[in-house]
Amino acid sequence: MRPSQNSRRAILCALAALTAAPAFAQDRSVYSDNELVENGHRFFGSLSRGLAEAIQSATKRWGQPNAYILGQEAGGAFVGGLRYGEGSIYTRNAGDRRVYWQGPSVGFDAGANGDRTMMLVYSLPSVDAIFQRFGGIDGSAYLIGGFGVTALGANGVMVVPIRTGVGARLGVNLGYLKFTPNSTWNPF
């Protein structure tokens, strides 16, 4: 059963009311939970309860992001793996920009998946600071479809990918994502 537009709107309003801060206390360079959920809703096609919970969990832990990335990616692994993606980074004070990411991984991991991805970016001093390697641990459990959240960090900047997609993948791995301004097949 698919929720109606009115129930979606009610969920968004309730979420906004729960997360709203006084206008004078808001930092105009960061994104609120409500803005992230609305943009994620438009990008993912429908409001996902899991998406809203993932965004709330990330903002509770790391605060409000000052940038986010919307894109798509594909990955596969059998002990060693690769992931490739492309999208756009959105910031309030430096505009929007096309970005690409790729990266290797190694671990107890097997399968393949294709995802739509929203990445929350924290403490980004400039848009060019995204162009580096972000390392971390990733776990996946997809059977036909799935939803996952990880955290990657480098030089005080945190990137939190929220992925939803299709495929069959199970495992845990250690790896990194390298962000570049141009598309490349080289994950290193």
Image (cartoon, helix red, strand yellow):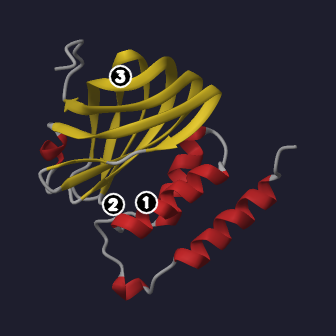
Q: Is residue 106 visible?
A: yes
Of mark 3 and mark 1, the one earlier in the sequence is 1
Q: Nearer the viewer, mark 1 or mark 2?
A: 1
Q: Give the crowd class for mark 1: few <14, some 14-19, many >=20 residues within 10 Å.
A: many
| Residue identifier under label 1 | 58
CA gap between label 3 and label 1 equals 22 Å
- What secondary structure is marked by label 3? strand
Front-lying residue, 177 or 110: 110
Amino acid type at image mark 3: Arg
In the rendered image, residue 27, in percent from the top left (x then y), is placed at: 31, 75
On screen, residue 90 above or below 32: above
Q: Quadrant of the N terminus?
A: top right
Tell me the crowding category of disc 2: few under 14, some 14 to 19, or many 20 or more residues within 10 angstroms, Cα based: many
Mark 1 or mark 2: which comes first in sequence?
Answer: 1
- For the residues marked 1 and 2, what is the alpha-carbon distance in whole angstroms? 9 Å
Find disc 2 in the rendering and name its residue. 65
**Mark number, residue 83:** 3
Residue that lies at the very extreme toward the front in this rendered image? 108
The quadrant in which residue 107 appears is top left
Look at 62% across and 51% down and name the residue there: 50
